[in-house]
Image: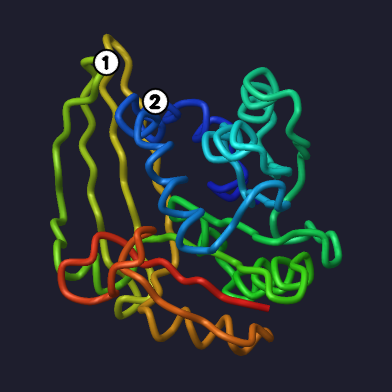
């Protein structure tokens, strides 16, 4: 069987500069400002970043005095994160199975890191693991491209020039009656062409809310971004804050 795209190191290595642009990295501090206010966190609260990627949010939270654990499956990303913040606990693990009972005040799942897996039950496994890892009253924060957001600005094909001069064609194909979206990326960089295809599950706000309540969260609030704006027309993202 072929390796699922979410477990394929060549995807994460080959498209790292597409996902973590200089502009995105520069905006991390403002995102953490908004996140801390939205959840009501103060140091030295314990935070789990699941998955953490290259650790951009984890590193910033640690800089502010939070006790942070970052979990990711891609070792090169973890190595970069360790070099940036050795004081953070970095763990190589699959987010579907990582559980540390009642250890954290907040669990973060940011930058459309929910809905990766082919089996919908895996999304529930991630949510249950987050629930089990939270202390009473703790918050699970999911930030993603909501179904309504994508529908409002849907473009099937887009051509972008990236910061390093490379160019990328992105094709976005809605599948299964808006249950999922298939992305096809073609990257042109110097004399190299690189292709990637991946599929993510789409959630409307009410669908994500129902999933979180079904796995046992006591309360779920939906927002249009980390700054707490309403999830309605014009919202750039879907953010769910689920409390244990």
Percent position of residue 81, x then y: 63, 27
Examine the rendered structure and indicate whether residue 73 appears above or below residue 213. above
Whichever of labels 1 and 2 marks the residue nearer the N terminus, that label is 2
Examine the rendered structure and indicate whether residue 22 appears above or below residue 32. above
Disc 1 is placed on an element classified as loop
Percent position of residue 17, x then y: 39, 25
**Label 1 – label 2 distance at C-alpha:** 9 Å
x 60%, y 67%: residue: 140
x 61%, y 29%: residue: 77
The front one of 30 and 112 is 30
x 70%, y 52%: residue: 45
Q: Looking at the figure, which quarter contains the C terminus?
A: bottom right
Q: Are marks 1 and 2 in contact (CB under 8 Å)?
A: yes
**Image-based side of 192 in relation to 213, left or right:** left
Quickly name the residue at label 2: 17
**Image-based side of 233 in relation to 218, left or right:** left
Number of callouts: 2
Examine the rendered structure and indicate whether residue 66 appears above or below residue 202. above
Quickly name the residue at label 1: 164
The front one of 99 and 32 is 32
Percent position of residue 126, x then y: 66, 66
């Amino acid at each position: 069987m072929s390796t699922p795209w979410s477990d394929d190191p060549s995807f994460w290595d080959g498209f790292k500069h597409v996902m973590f642009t200089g502009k995105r990295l520069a905006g991390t501090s403002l995102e953490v400002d908004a996140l801390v206010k939205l959840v009501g966190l103060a140091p030295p609260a314990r935070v789990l970043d699941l998955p953490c990627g290259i650790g951009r949010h984890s590193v910033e939270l640690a800089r502010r005095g939070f006790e942070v654990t970052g979990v990711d499956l891609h070792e090169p990303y973890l190595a970069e994160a360790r070099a940036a913040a050795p004081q953070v606990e970095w763990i190589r693990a699959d987010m579907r199975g990582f559980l540390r009972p009642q250890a954290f005040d907040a669990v973060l799942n940011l930058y459309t890191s929910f809905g990766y897996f082919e089996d919908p039950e895996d999304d529930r496994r991630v949510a249950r693991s987050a629930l089990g890892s939270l202390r009473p009253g703790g918050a699970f924060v999911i930030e993603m491209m909501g179904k309504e957001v994508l529908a409002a600005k849907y473009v099937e094909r887009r051509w972008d020039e990236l910061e390093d001069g490379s160019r990328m064609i992105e094709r976005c194909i809605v599948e299964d009656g808006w249950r999922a979206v298939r992305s096809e990326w073609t990257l042109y960089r110097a004399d190299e062409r690189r292709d990637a295809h991946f599929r993510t599950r789409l959630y409307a706000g009410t669908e994500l809310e129902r999933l979180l309540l079904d796995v046992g969260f006591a309360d779920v609030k939906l927002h249009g971004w980390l700054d707490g704006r309403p999830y309605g027309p014009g919202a750039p993202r879907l953010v769910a804050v689920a409390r244990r």
